[in-house]
Structures are given as C-alpha cells and as structure tokens.
Image (tube, rainbow, N blue to C red):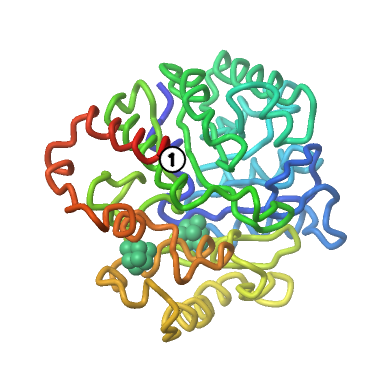
C-alpha cells in the first residue's frame, strides 16, 4: 500500500525543498511557469548538487522534490537522487511522464517515495494541446500503469486553466480506485502562461466546489484528493481543501524553492524579486537562517489600502493566502480566496451557515451547478 499521506503532502510536508533541477525539457507546456525548454547556462554541476543535498539535510529538510524542466533529462539525476536517499530524505520526482519507461529499474533501486506526473486533460486532445506534444496523454497514462505495476508510488498533478477546468470529472474517473494521490492547482500567469487563460474567480470557486464534493463523496482510499496551497481560505461553506488547516504561506518556512543555478527563494512560485541568495556565494544555512524573514515579512506587512486581505479579519491567521498566487494574479483588491468570493456570491442572500454544519452532497451539488451554470 503506497503511503498516500506522503504522496498527498509532499508540497506542504514539513521542510520540503522543491528543486528546479534543470530547465531542460522535452515538453512545451503552455502553462510552464519557468518557460522551460533549454537548460540554464549556469546550472549547478553534479558536485555542487551533491553538496547542496547534504546542506539541506543539515538545515533540517527531510524531503526534496526534484522538478524541472524535466528532471530525468539531467544525466546525473540518479546520482543526486541516490544522495538524497542516502541522507535519509524523502524523494519525489515531478515528471511529464514522457520517458519514465527507461528509468523504472533505477526508480525501484532508489525506493523512491513518489513519482508525480502531470495530467492536464481528461481527453488526449486537451492534454496534448496543453503539453505541446502529440501523444503525451497516452504516454503519461502508460507511465502511470508501468509505475503502478512495479509498485512505485505515483501521484498526479492537474494544473487547471480555462481550457481544462470542465474536464476534472473525466480526470477523476481515470484516477478513481487506483490509489493515486491527486493534487489540483491553478495555472498562474507566470513564465509563458497567458493571463487570458487563467480561470476566473467564479470558476475558481467552481473548482473548489468540485474538490469539496469529491472529498465528501469518496474516501481517501478511493480518491486521495487535495487542493494545493492556492485553493482555499476560510470558506463559510466548504471544508479545508488541503491536508491541514491553513496557517499561512509556507514560503521559506516548511517550503523552500531552489532554481537550477543555485538561486534560493522561499518558494518557486514567487518571482525573482524574492531570490534570497545563491548557494555559490553564500552558504545554504546562512541563506536559510538569516534572510527569509526579511523580504517575506517586509512584503506581507506593507500597509496597502488597496489590499483586500489587509482589512480581512482573518489576515493575522491567513496572511493573505498564497503569496505567489496573489503576486502572479496581481489580485490584491480581488483575491482568489473562498472567503472573499463567497462574500460577493452571496451578498444578496443570507449566508447558508446551515450548509456547513449539515453539508450533504446534494447541497454542494446544488451550489456547484448554480455557480457553474449560471
Ligand atoms: S481575504 Fe485574504 S486574509 Fe482574508 S481569508 Fe481571504 S486570503 Fe485570507
Ligand atoms: S507562495 Fe503559495 S505555493 Fe508557495 S509556499 Fe506560499 S502558499 Fe505555498
């Protein structure tokens, strides 16, 4: 039985470093936040990467997620992955699933904790269009099958945009009862993703309803589903969509972002203004221990009257939700936040408190249709 809790939680696991291992990629995803394709000219070499793993361990990180680009395109991925496991850290590799077949033996040897694959459409046409590769859908489904056959834990990430948000039902039907953890997140207008394709706040609420409905309908064994950090905050009606109650953005706290050239940020979702240092010039422990609170807090505590969150009664607890989302969407006056959206949606009606207490699926369904079909 795979460790579903781990598969679900690697993004928010206590002290997990998310490492853009290379920018080299064999996909051309329209939503790629790093505009991946070619490697950076100054990516860390093997020795630097191995030293970084040890440094992260000594700073208390107990998990590393290698992502890209496509991590398997780096010739030394196995050496670095081995180092991660030898340092007794959890290892996740986030991949587009195009070339997994040739890596199975090594993945088994490593006893990898999770291979996380992107699935962005419920039908081949949509997934292939979003990933920019014909045949990508068939390949990712084949990769899931092979990994499961070999008992390698696998999870799926779906990045939602205007093209695919109505296909979540189809993706769910592919994943149900397969013991595949499923994370849903929104596509943000960073890298090469067009702002025109970002889902509206209403659609965002519809997707949140979809997650809530399915959390209600299926047990964690049937459908281990989770909303990423960008989904939520203090809804009057919906349950928590993440694994744990929301306690504010984890950038530089339990989450760390590493770029392939050694730049360190609190989280890879944040813009380059949030680079806190580079491991080639500053020791990783110095960056982690002395710098984060500076930029991060400076930003959070900027008194900005345009900032909706600043006047919200939950601000102290919530800290404005996902900082990367707020910045990418420039949504300071209209946050992608369930609490804020509900205020608008139900402004002429009394808020249906009862629904939270007596949250039967039929009531979610009614609301879901009302919002999405209106
Ligand atoms: S309005 Fe802002 S501070 Fe309030 S709950 Fe939503 S995201 Fe959090
Ligand atoms: S910026 Fe968003 S994704 Fe990154 S740690 Fe903060 S909440 Fe999580």
Total of numbered circles in the picture? 1
Image quarter where the N terminus lies is: top left
As drawn, the residue found furthest toward the bottom would be 303
- Inspect this view and state whether residue 60 appears: no
**Which of the pair 114/335 is nearer the observer?**
335
Above or below for 33 versus 181? below
Pinpoint residue 167: horizontal percent, then vertical percent: 54, 28
- Residue at image coords 61%, 29%: 121
Quarter assignment of residue 300: bottom left
Quarter assignment of residue 363: top left
- Residue at image coords 68%, 23%: 137
Q: Image check: 356 left or right of 5?
A: left
- Residue at image coords 74%, 60%: 48
Q: Residues within 10 Å of mark 1 (few under 14, many from 20)?
A: many
Q: Image check: 122 left or right of 216?
A: right
User: The residue tagged with tag 1: helix, strand or loop?
Assistant: helix
**Residue beneath disc 1:** 207
- Inspect this view and state whether residue 169 appears: yes
Above or below for 8 versus 303? above
């Amino acid at each position: 039985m795979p460790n579903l809790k781990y598969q679900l939680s690697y993004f928010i696991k206590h002290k997990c470093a998310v490492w853009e291992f290379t920018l080299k990629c064999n996909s051309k995803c329209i939503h790629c936040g790093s505009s991946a394709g070619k490697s950076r000219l100054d990516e860390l070499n093997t020795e630097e990467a191995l030293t970084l793993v040890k440094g992260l361990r000594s700073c208390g990180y107990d998990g590393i997620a290698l992502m890209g680009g496509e991590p398997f395109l780096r010739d030394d991925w196995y050496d670095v992955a081995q180092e991660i496991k030898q340092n007794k850290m959890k290892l996740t590799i986030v991949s587009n699933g195009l070339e997994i077949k040739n890596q199975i033996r090594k993945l088994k040897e490593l006893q990898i904790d999770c291979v996380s694959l992107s699935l962005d459409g419920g039908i081949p046409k949509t997934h292939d269009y979003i990933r920019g590769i014909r045949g990508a859908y068939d390949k990712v489904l084949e990769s899931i099958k092979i990994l499961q056959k070999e008992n390698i834990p696998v999870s799926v990430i779906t990045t939602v945009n205007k093209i695919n948000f109505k296909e979540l039902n189809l993706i769910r039907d592919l994943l149900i009862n397969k013991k595949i953890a499923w994370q849903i997140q929104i596509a943000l207008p960073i890298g090469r993703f067009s702002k025109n394709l970002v889902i509206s706040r209403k659609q965002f609420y519809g997707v949140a309803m979809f997650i809530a409905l399915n959390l209600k309908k299926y047990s964690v064994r049937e459908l281990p589903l989770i909303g990423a950090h960008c989904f939520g905050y203090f809804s009057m009606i919906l349950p928590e969509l993440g694994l744990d109650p929301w306690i504010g953005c984890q950038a530089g706290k339990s989450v760390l972002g590493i770029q392939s050239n050694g730049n360190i940020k609190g989280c890879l979702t944040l813009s380059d203004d949030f680079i806190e240092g580079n491991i080639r010039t500053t020791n990783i422990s110095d960056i982690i221990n002395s710098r984060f609170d500076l930029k991060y807090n400076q930003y959070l505590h900027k008194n900005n009257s345009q900032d909706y969150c600043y006047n919200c009664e939950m601000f102290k607890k919530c800290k404005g939700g996902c900082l990367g989302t707020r910045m990418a969407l420039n949504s300071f006056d209209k946050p992608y936040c369930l609490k804020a959206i509900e205020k608008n949606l139900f402004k002429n009606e009394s808020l249906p408190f009862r629904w939270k207490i007596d949250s039967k699926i039929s009531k979610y369904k009614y609301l879901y249709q009302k919002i999405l079909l209106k």
